[in-house]
Image (spheres, rainbow, N blue to C red):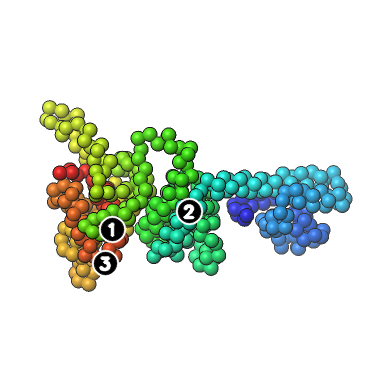
Amino acid sequence: MSLPINLINEAARHLEEQEEALRIKKVLFCLCKKYWENNLIILNAFSVTDLLGEIWSSYTTLDDFKTALVKLIKTLNRPNIYTEVGKVVFHCISKLYKYVDKENQQTAIVVQSIDNNILNSVALKLQSHQEKSRIKKVVYSVCKKHWENDIEVIESYNFQDLILELIQHYPTKEELQKALIKLVKNINKQNLYLAISNLIVTQLGNLYNNKQVTNHIEEEGNTQFTNPQFVQVNNSYYIAPNRIEPQPLANQNFGTSVIDLSAQPVIEQASQSLPPIPQPSQPEQTPKIIDFFELRLEIMQYTIPLRAKVLLFSVLYQTWDKDNQDWAMLRSYSLEDLLKELIQNTKNINDIESKLFAASRVLTDFEANMQTAGTIVEAIKPFVTNH
């Protein structure tokens, strides 16, 4: 197992700050190169970080390293001084081995708690996606904590192994979401990679649910977890993503909600228990105010903003035609403007659903547009009447 570079750098920095830093470096050099070196020019040609990395590669276990260190110190002059040097070196390097032992134990627990059938199914779905290269790049980068553009490096890793490593580094879905958001904030094409990150979280959700079901099934309370499913819309199908229902719009997690038109959604059941529409005699009860900025952010988490604008434009004005003057007109509207007009000019949520799905069927990239339509419907549902 490779060590995180930040861990090696931290160990190197600690050793370089010691009073006996030169003797420490001589000991490390000898353990790596198998001979004693006093020439400072040669010693300075190697960084402590490089020497630690070489030691890690040369000594499989901490016991192997300890044995070599003790043998070396016994052969040196000034044994009292080098015994203390050896203690400092051993204490520092032992932390590296203990870190890996802990990681290996966690890996064993993760592997034991994950159903291989689910793991293989998740990997197959992600590898079959049209954006499979970018998906693997994101998974790799979140695992290794750095962005990698070398395709050969990424392809040298087995996808199932990367997924296991991902779950090992991020034991909960929430931790994975935070890591993905942090990654996306630092790269180009953020909207595209945000959508890819959402897809990864949606698919890996099955693994997290499988891993935690025996320990946390009683902790979920009234929160309903739903799995991705195929939803029929006028003899057509799209994959509805995951969501934890119900939550306030501004506090939604990375996942998106299930749109099941064949059954009454949970959010509708909850709405039946709400108090009547406020009357003038009850000024403390006010209708829910739409924050269109938050609504836009909600939608942008789960779909590409331009795709959402094109779909809304097609509903409100005319079917999108990329070859005519529609681009100029589209640029004159913000996503918030189009959402506001959609809500103001449609009767109810069923009317909005019908229009969005109808527009999706005539636009190119049917599946992606159906996904976007579902995202918009679920985002605005709390603010629109059901009848």
User: Gap in Å between the C-alphas at discs 1 and 2?
Assistant: 25 Å
SS at mark 2 in the image: helix
Q: Nearer the viewer, mark 3 or mark 1?
A: 1
- Left or right of 231: which side holds 19? right
Mark number for residue 382? Answer: none
Earlier in the chain: of badge 3 and badge 1, it is 1
What x and y, as percent, mark residue 363?
Answer: 23, 65
SS at mark 3 in the image: loop
What x and y, as percent, mark residue 101?
Answer: 64, 47
Residue 290 visible here: no
User: Gap in Å between the C-alphas at discs 3 and 1?
Assistant: 15 Å
- The kind of residue tagged 3 is Thr
Relative depth, front residue between 374 and 238: 238
Which residue is found at the position 67% from the left and 51% from the top?
A: 12
Residue 141 against residue 209 in the figure, above or below:
below
Relative depth, front residue between 383 and 330: 383
Earlier in the chain: of badge 1 and badge 2, it is 2
Packing grade of label 1 (10 A; few <14, some 14-19, many >=20) is some
Q: Which quarter of the figure is the N terminus placed in? A: bottom right
Mark number for residue 364? Answer: 3
Relative depth, front residue between 216 and 172: 216
Q: Which residue is mark 2?
A: 117
Q: Are marks 1 and 2 in contact (CB under 8 Å)?
A: no
Which residue is found at the position 23% from the left and 40% from the top?
A: 268
- The kind of residue tagged 1 is Tyr
What x and y, as percent, mark residue 337?
Answer: 21, 53
- Left or right of 368: which side holds 158? right
Relative depth, front residue between 72 and 241: 241
- The kind of residue tagged 2 is Asn
Packing grade of label 2 (10 A; few <14, some 14-19, many >=20) is few
SS at mark 1 in the image: strand
Q: Which residue is mark 1?
A: 237
